[in-house]
Amino acid sequence: MLDVIAGYDPEDPSTAKGVEHIPDSYTDYLNPTGLDGARIGILRTVFSSGPESDPVVEVAEEAIGDLKALGAKTIEVDAEIDVDELIDSFYVGNFEQQERFNEYLDSLGSGAPIETFEDFVEADEYHESLESGLQAALEIESPTDEPEYFKRLYRRNQFIERLYDIMAADELDAFFFPHQKQLVAEIGDDQ
C-alpha cells in the first residue's frame, strides 16, 4: 500500500517533505529483527479506562507484548495528557470543514451535485448523527480567519514540540498508543 501512495501530491503540500526519502519499495524494510533495540515510548496517559474502552486496551496490551517479543524495549512515558481536553483544545475540524468541502465541490466543476457546504447542510440529506457537527461548522462565518483557529493550530504545534522533546530526552524511536478510545461505532451510532 505504501509503495502505491508514496510520492508528491500537489493537493497535499506536506508530501513534499518526503520526496527525497522514498525507497524503491517499502517491503525492503520488512526485517524480522527490525525492532531489536528499538525504544518505544508507551503513552499510557492516552489509554482510556472503562468498559467501553476495554476491547481497545486489550488489543493495545497484546501489541505491546508483541513489540517486546520482537526485541523492542518499551518505556512508560508520562506526557501528562488529558486526551479529551487535548482534543478539545486543538481540534480544528469545524473551522476547516466548510472551506475544504467547498474546495472539493469546486474541484468537481459542473459535475458537482450541489454548489456549497451550506447547500449540503440545508438539503438535510445526511444522517442525523452528523447534524450537530455540520451545524457547528456552518455557524463559523469566516472559519480560517478566526483568532481561535490560529490559537488551536498553535496549541497543536506546541504539543508536537512537546512530544519531540520527550522523544529526545528518553531517546525514543517511536511512541505507541491506541488510535482511539473505543471500538469504531456502527453507522448512525454516536462515538
Image (cartoon, helix red, strand yellow):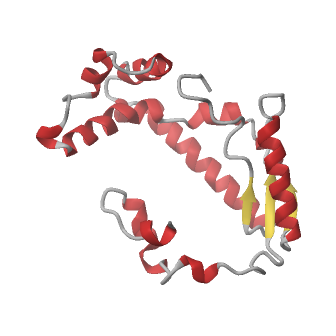
Q: Where on the picture, by quarter, is residue 16?
A: bottom left
Q: Residue at x 44, y 29 (%)?
A: 94
Q: Is 12 rendered above or below residue 48?
A: below
Question: Which quarter shows the C terminus?
Answer: top right
Residue 176 or 113: which is nearer the viewer? 113
Looking at the image, which residue sits at the far front?
Answer: 186
Q: Would residue 86 be seen by someone viewing this image from the given angle?
A: yes
Does residue 159 appear left or right of residue 131 in this picture? right
- Left or right, 172 with reference to 88: right
Looking at the image, which residue is at 40% across and 70% down?
A: 7
Residue 52 horizontal side relative to residue 96, left or right: right
89 up-or-down from 72: above or below: above
Q: Look at 79% across and 36% down and name the residue there.
A: 48
Q: In which quadrant of the rendered view does residue 156 lie?
A: top right
Give the percent coordinates (x, y) of residue 66: 83, 63
Looking at the picture, tell me which residue is in the foreground, 125 or 132: 125
